[in-house]
C-alpha cells in the first residue's frame, strides 16, 4: 500500500523526516510530494526544496520513498494516477487536532488521512519556526536542532546565510 507526505518543505526539518520514517514502517511506498503554491512566499525555490528533500531521502537509506514536485492544484491528480489513497500528517498539539476535526467534512485530497502525534521534541519543529529563527542571535545553533544534518552540513546551510543577505 502507498501513502503520501505532502508539503512545501521550506526547509525540510527533522519533523518531516520523523513523519516519513513513521510512514515507511507501515506503508510499502511513501511518495513525498514537494508542492509549489504560488500564494505562499517561500525561502527556497521549488527546485531547491525538492533537491533538499531528495538528498535527505537518499542519505536516510529508506527504500520505497520517492520525491516528486507538483503544483498545488495537481496533487489530487497525482495521487489518483499513483493510486495513493492515504495522506500522512503530523499533529503537534491539541489545537492542531481540534482544527483537523473541524475540517473533517472538507473535500479530502485522498481517501484517508492518517494522523501521527509528534513526539514532544518535534512540537515546535516546523518550517515556519526555522525560517523565523534565521538572522536572530545564535540562529545557526538553533537551526541545527530542527534541521537534519545533511542539510546543515551540506550546501543548504550556506544558502540559509545567503538568503538572509538578500
Image (cartoon, rainbow, N blue to C red):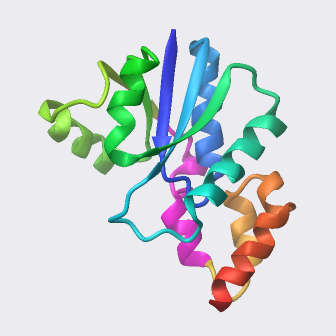
- The spot of residue 93 in percent (x, y) is 39, 47
**Left or right: where does residue 88 sit relative to residue 15?**
left
**What is the magenta range?**
117-133
The structure residue drawn at horizontal position 15% and vertical position 36%, both measured from the top left corner, is 106
Task: Please tell me which residue lies in front, 136 or 119.
Answer: 136
Which residue in the rendered view is the most extreme toward the right?
Answer: 153
| Residue reaching furthest to the top | 1
Q: Residue furthest left?
A: 105
Vertical side of 101 occupied by 145: above or below: below
- 28 or 129: which is nearer to us? 28
Whether residue 115 appears in this view of the structure is no
* Residue 97 appearing in the image: yes
Q: Is residue 9 one of those drawn in magenta? A: no
- Locate residue 47, reporting x and y percent: 62, 56
Q: How many marks?
A: 0
| Figure quadrant of the C terminus | bottom right
Residue at 49 percent of width and 28 percent of height: 4
**Residue 107: quadrant of the picture:** top left
Q: Position of residue 119 (x, y in %)?
A: 56, 40
Foreground: 120 or 154?
A: 154
Q: Against 59, is 29 above or below? A: above
> How far across and down, in percent of the image, does residue 100 sit?
26, 39
Residue 131 versus residue 105 in the image, above or below: below
Left/right placement of residue 46 relative to residue 138 reads left
- Give yes or no for residue 131 being in the magenta stretch: yes
Amino acid at each position: 500500500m502507498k501513502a503520501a507526505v505532502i508539503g512545501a518543505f521550506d526547509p525540510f526539518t527533522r519533523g518531516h523526516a520523523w513523519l516519513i520514517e513513521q510512514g515507511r514502517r507501515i506503508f510499502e511506498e511513501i511518495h513525498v510530494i514537494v508542492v509549489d503554491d504560488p500564494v505562499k512566499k517561500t525561502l527556497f525555490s521549488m527546485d531547491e526544496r525538492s533537491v533538499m528533500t531528495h538528498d535527505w531521502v537518499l542519505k536516510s537509506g529508506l527504500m520505497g520513498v520517492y520525491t516528486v514536485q507538483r503544483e498545488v492544484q495537481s496533487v489530487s491528480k497525482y495521487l489518483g494516477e499513483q493510486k495513493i489513497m492515504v495522506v500522512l500528517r503530523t499533529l503537534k498539539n491539541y489545537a492542531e487536532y481540534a482544527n483537523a476535526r473541524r475540517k473533517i467534512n472538507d473535500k479530502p485530497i485522498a481517501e484517508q488521512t492518517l494522523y501521527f502525534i509528534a513526539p514532544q521534541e518535534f512540537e515546535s519543529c516546523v518550517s515556519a519556526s526555522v525560517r523565523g529563527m534565521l538572522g536572530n542571535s545564535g540562529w545557526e545553533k538553533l537551526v541545527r536542532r530542527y534541521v537534519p544534518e545533511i542539510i546543515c552540513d551540506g550546501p543548504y546551510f550556506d544558502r540559509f546565510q545567503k538568503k538572509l543577505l538578500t
